[in-house]
Each structure stands twice: as C-alpha cells, then as structure tokens.
Amino acid sequence: MQHDDNLTTERPSFVTHLECAMTGERHEADRVHNLSRAGKPLLVRYDLAAMRKALSKDALAQRPPDLWRYREMLPVRATENIVSLGEAMTPLIAMPKLSARLGGGEILVKDEGRLPTGSFKARGLVMAVSMAKALGIKHMAMPTNGNAGAALAAYATRAGIKSTIFCPQDTPEVNVSEIALQGATVYRVNGLIDDCGKIVADGKAKVGWFDTSTLKEPYRIEGKKTMGLELAEQLGWQVPDAIFYPTGGGTGLIGMWKAFAELEAIGFIGSKRPRMIAVQAAGCAPMVRAFEAGQEHAPRWENAHTIASGIRVPQAVGDFLILRAVRASGGFAIAVTDDAIQAALDEMAREEGLLLCPEGAATYAAYKQSLHDGRIAKAERVVLFNCASGLKYPLPGVQRTLDRHKPIDFAAL
Ligand SMILES: Cc1ncc(COP(=O)(O)O)c(C=O)c1O
C-alpha cells in the first residue's frame, strides 16, 4: 500500500442521480446544481446494489486511512479531479476520567481539529471543490462563520478556482486571516451569516459565481457523510448509542444520517441507529425551539448571539432534514448556555488534556445536561464531535512570570 493510493487509483463512483430532499424529484448527475427545482436541498443518490457487490469491508481495511478510502460512496468520478490537502481519518478519543466522574458511560470525542484548515469543514469543502473542478466551475462564493470559508479558500486555491467569501463582522480574527492568506477574497459584513448568504445569492444572479452555501450545494453533505462512515468503521462497523453534534446549518448531522442508511443498504451495519442529538447555543437555538414545538421547519432566530460562532446560524435551509433525522433517530435538540460551554471547555482541557473548540465544548456541556435530565442514560456510549481545533480560537492569557535573575523558590512552584 502506498500512502496516496486513494488519490491515485481509479475507483468507480456509484452515483446515479440527485434527488430533491422534499419532493423526491430526480435531477441529473454530472451537471451544475444548487437547490432543487422546488427550492430545497438536493441529495446525491447511488446504485447501492452495485456498490454492495463492488465494495467489501476487507477491501476498505487495506486502504490508506483518509476520507478518500470511501471513494465508491462519494460523488467524484475521475481521480484527476480529487483536490486533496491530506484529509486524514480523525481519531476517536476516550475520556476515561470524565466518564468515571459522570457515572461510567463511555465518552468518545471525534477530534475533527486534525483535518486540513483545522476543522471538519474540510470534509464538505474538499468534496464541493473537487466536484466544482469536475464540473468546470471557475468562481465559488460563500457566506461563512469562519471555518467553512477557510476550507473553501484552501481547496479552491489548490484547484485554481477563484473564491469570494463573506463573513459576519465579528468572525474570529484567525478565520478571516487564514481565508485571506489561503488566496480567497474575504469581506467582513455588518450582519449575520444569513445576511452574508443574501449577498452571495445576489452575486450569483448578477455575476454568475457559484453559490457554495450550506445545503445550496449538493456535495458538501457527501463530504460530511464521511464522519458517519469513519465512525462506524472505527467502532468495528457498529454505531454508538448517541451522537452529540454542534448544529448550525446541520450538514454533518444530515450527512451522517445519510451515511448510516447507505451503510445499512450495502450490508455494512445493521438497523441500529445512534440517537442524533442536535446541540445549539441558548442564544441561537432555532432547531431546539422547532423540535420542542413539533414543527417541521425552524423559523429565524432573532438577535442570535453565542461564543460558539460556528453554530450561530439563525436559519437553516435544511431545517426539515435536521429535524427529521433527530426525530427519526429518537434523539432530541438541546440548547446550552455560553457559561456552560466555557465551563465544559475548561473542564475537558484541565481533566483530559484535550482542548476543544467552543462548538465542540457545547456537545460536552449538552451531554452533561442530558445525563442530568435523564435524557441520556449513564450506560450509553456517546460520541461528541469536536469539530475544530481549539487552537483556532482566542485563548485566555497567562499572568504567571518568573525572573530568572532572582533565586527561585522551587518548593513553591
Ligand atoms: C466549529 C464549528 N462547529 C460547528 C459548525 C456547524 O456545522 P454544521 O453547519 O454542519 O451544522 C460550524 C459551522 O460553521 C463550525 O465552524
């Protein structure tokens, strides 16, 4: 096995068509698409019977550990269109001290901070940009809370595609800088992500750039789907009891739900599904409100605010898909306060040595809250998604200093 086998070997993709997630209407594969004719997200469909014959667990096990090992389950047909920066399989890390303290349920953190550009947005954007390359798209635009824009900038530059990115004014500095450094044109906008989305939609109409917004582009879900594929494979083709996912636009939650259905269809897993738990911030919780009200769609959340900027998404075009997956899985949507997020971040860093991003910390806060409410049982095996490196966020300063010219009282250190 060579390290880059997945990037150099021709393997078939079993894509057959795309389907409107609301009406089921069929749309042709290998064409440029945004939303369906009904104005809803498009889902990529595959010939699962043929995939089942072509792909085995043993064959997968022989391949290098990166996202492209699942090639048959992904939409990119020709190897030459793969645009890669090294999408390593991310580790599942056990948290034994926290688990023992909270009553014994296994806590696993899937640490997505190891991916290119330091977040799980790389999974979606590597697929969107590879497909854009295959389809001859020359200019991609996107609204972002930071991490998605960074991933688009990196992959678009790598592919020789122009990218223009709009983010809310208060997007973390590191994100705006990395987007610019990685070759995109980036603007801070005095509004939230959906306000930035309107600029992208207007530009699409006026200058014809491609709208790469969450779920208005069909392939980011396929990239995010690999979180579910990886997770099942890492657990020996089992699924956990529950997945806590920090939910903004919800691409990952929808993608994982799709992954489990496809894995069952090809005989890799059984009918058990994890309970999908959509985690939001108390200052921006449209899914929680809609879930609790029994609604199919989630109206816009006004005055959205939270330290977890990645999940500050007031309204999501895939709201009904998130809510459907959460309900079908027997899961729930839960909101946590910024104080609980900060406390969770501090606790995991201090106790287990793992620095989470605020959105990832929200999942640990939500897990604790769910244990307390009794919505999660102590014996359950849960997976928490740490979706970005904690190093991308402003960190607290350290005041302690030492004067090396003076005697040091070592016993007091
Ligand atoms: C760190 C982080 N966590 C979570 C999310 C939300 O992801 P999704 O759009 O898949 O719900 C984002 C999106 O910007 C993010 O950057």
Image (cartoon, helix red, strand yellow):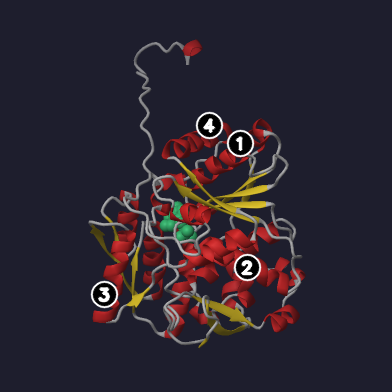
The residue that label 1 is drawn on is 372
The residue that label 3 is drawn on is 202
- Are discs 2 and 4 less than 8 Å apart at CB? no
Q: Nearer the viewer, mark 2 or mark 4?
A: 2
Q: Earlier in the sequence, mark 2 or mark 1?
A: 2
Count of numbered circles in the view: 4
- Are discs 3 and 2 less than 8 Å apart at CB? no
Q: Earlier in the sequence, mark 3 or mark 2?
A: 3
The residue that label 2 is drawn on is 259
Label 2 and label 4: CA atoms lie apart by 34 Å
Residue closest to the eye, 34 or 331: 331
Q: Amino acid at mark 3?
A: Asp
Secondary structure of the residue carrying numbered label 2: helix
Q: Is mark 1 within 8 Å of ligand 1?
A: no
Q: Is mark 3 within 8 Å of ligand 1?
A: no
Residue closest to the eye, 61 or 291: 291
Label 2 and label 1: CA atoms lie apart by 30 Å
Q: Earlier in the sequence, mark 4 or mark 3?
A: 3
Q: Nearer the viewer, mark 3 or mark 2?
A: 3
Q: Which mark is residue 350?
A: 4
Residue closest to the eye, 9 or 345: 345
Q: Quadrant of the rendered structure where residue 317 is?
A: bottom left
Q: Nearer the viewer, mark 2 or mark 1?
A: 1
Label 3 and label 1: CA atoms lie apart by 46 Å
Secondary structure of the residue carrying numbered label 1: helix
Q: In the image, is 242 to the left or to the right of 278?
A: right
Q: Amino acid at mark 2?
A: Ala
Q: Amino acid at mark 4?
A: Arg
* Rendered residue at 29%/62% (across/down): 195
